[in-house]
């Protein structure tokens, strides 16, 4: 489904947050705090959120949103102007069932999912003209329902699927900025996704493959730090083949920022250690496949992908025993 439109966005949108992990809870609570009409799909811990609201711990402040509009199904929420997809890409098999009740003719669906190729499943359901994506540079965890610990609020980069930013994109960016969430509208969404992989591929992957270590350990180990650098170089080289060139200074910036966050458990490591699904294909598999498609050499990325795949298969086998 496709059509040519000049999309607009209402000044006071009705918003649905699909998923209340760390990102959905954090961004949704900030929007509520800013006075927006926000409705949360809560698949675990609904009673807790309704009774206690959301508490957010930031480096310089504490936020408490006492009243949350939470629901067990999206059918109870009904059509919204903005739908924010905050479930992991590993749950996309349920995406059509989740999104359909939330749509009207002009609904925009913004996915916060990690990795490459995450807008396309949304577009297959709602149409490319209603699909947008966000790259989230944030350090946040949800230790329990309704509680978020955010060590690095970071920023959001948002863009449209397959087209430059437009009036709707900029309206979305304004909405987030007014809610205290630093946000920028970007013309090249795909390029931004490759940039996010420069950090996600090495630090999430090595943290798991090296036995469950934090980012400070990776930085302090000469061999692991070198491996992280080589993985970054492979991602950047492949991205350049697709027209997304990045200066070497961008790679150096990733190490500088990572050093500042100290002893940090990447999100994929947390998922792995807590027995949840890991975004294997979106973060490691898809860049491998895209590299192969153009004949690009990414030996370390391929090795890391297969190691992670084997570790996840072994974990699954243990759980089934």
Image (cartoon, helix red, strand yellow):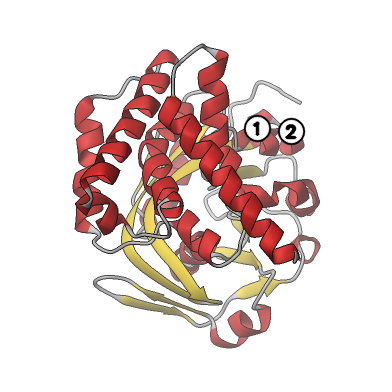
Q: Which residue is mark 1?
A: 120
Residue lying at the far top in this picture: please name it.
Answer: 295
Rendered position, 240 above or below 314: above
Residue neighbourhood size for the residue with mark 2, other residues' Cα within 10 Å, grouped as few (<14), some (14–19), many (≥20): few
- Residue 174 visible here: no
Q: Specify whether 97 is left or right of 286.
A: right
**Whether residue 23 is visible:** yes
Q: Secondary structure at mark 1?
A: helix
In this rendering, would 248 be left or right of 160? Answer: left
Q: Establish if 74 lies above or below 8.
A: below
168 left or right of 78?
Answer: left
Q: Residue at x 45, y 34 (%)?
A: 193
Reply above or below: 160 against 135: above
- Mark 2 element type: helix
Point out which mark residue 313 bears: none
- Report the residue at 54% width, 81% height from top: 53
Say which residue appears at 40% left-offset and 39% top-offset. Answer: 196
- Residue at x 29%, y 24% (from the top left corner): 246
**In the rendered view, does 43 fall on the left or right side of 216?**
right
Quadrant in which the C terminus is drawn: bottom right
In percent of width and height, residue 239 lies at 41, 22
Q: Position of residue 6 (x, y in %)?
A: 58, 27
Q: Which part of the image, by quadrant, shows the N terminus? A: top right
Q: Picture coordinates of residue 17 (x, y %)? A: 61, 59
Decide which of 299, 139 is in the foreground and name it.
299
Pick whichever, 248 or 53, lies toward us. 248
- Would you say the residues marked 2 and 1 are in contact, meaning their CB atoms lie under 8 Å apart? yes
Disc 2 target residue: 124
């Amino acid at each position: 489904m496709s059509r040519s439109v000049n999309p607009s966005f209402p000044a006071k949108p009705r918003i649905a947050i699909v998923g209340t992990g760390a990102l959905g809870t954090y961004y949704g609570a900030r929007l509520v705090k800013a006075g927006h009409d926000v409705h949360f799909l809560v698949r675990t811990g609904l009673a807790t959120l309704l009774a206690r609201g959301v508490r957010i711990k930031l480096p310089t402040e504490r936020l408490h949103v006492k009243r949350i509009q939470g629901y067990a199904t999206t059918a109870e929420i009904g059509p919204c102007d903005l739908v924010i997809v905050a479930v992991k890409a590993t749950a996309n098999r349920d995406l059509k069932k989740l999104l359909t009740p939330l749509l009207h003719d002009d609904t925009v669906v913004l996915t916060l999912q990690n990795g490459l190729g995450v807008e396309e499943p949304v577009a297959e359901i709602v149409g490319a003209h209603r699909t947008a994506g966000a790259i989230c540079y944030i350090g946040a965890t949800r230790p329990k329902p309704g509680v978020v610990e955010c060590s690095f609020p970071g920023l959001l980069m948002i863009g449209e699927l397959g087209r430059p930013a437009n009036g709707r994109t900029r309206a979305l960016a304004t909405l987030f900025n007014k809610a205290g969430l630093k946000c920028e509208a970007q013309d090249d969404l795909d390029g931004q996704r490759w940039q996010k992989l420069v950090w996600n591929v090495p630090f999430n992957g090595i943290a798991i493959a090296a036995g469950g270590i934090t980012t400070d350990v990776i930085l302090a180990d000469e061999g692991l730090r070198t491996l992280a650098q080589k993985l970054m170089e492979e991602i950047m080289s492949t991205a350049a083949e697709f027209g997304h060139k990045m200066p070497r200074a961008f790679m150096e910036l990733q190490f500088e920022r990572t050093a500042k966050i100290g002893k940090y458990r990447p999100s994929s490591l947390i998922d792995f250690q807590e027995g949840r699904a890991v975004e294997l294909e979106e973060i490691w598999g898809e860049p491998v496949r895209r590299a192969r498609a153009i004949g690009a050499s990414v030996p370390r990325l391929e090795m890391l992908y297969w190691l992670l795949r084997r570790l996840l298969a072994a974990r699954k086998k243990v759980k089934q025993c």
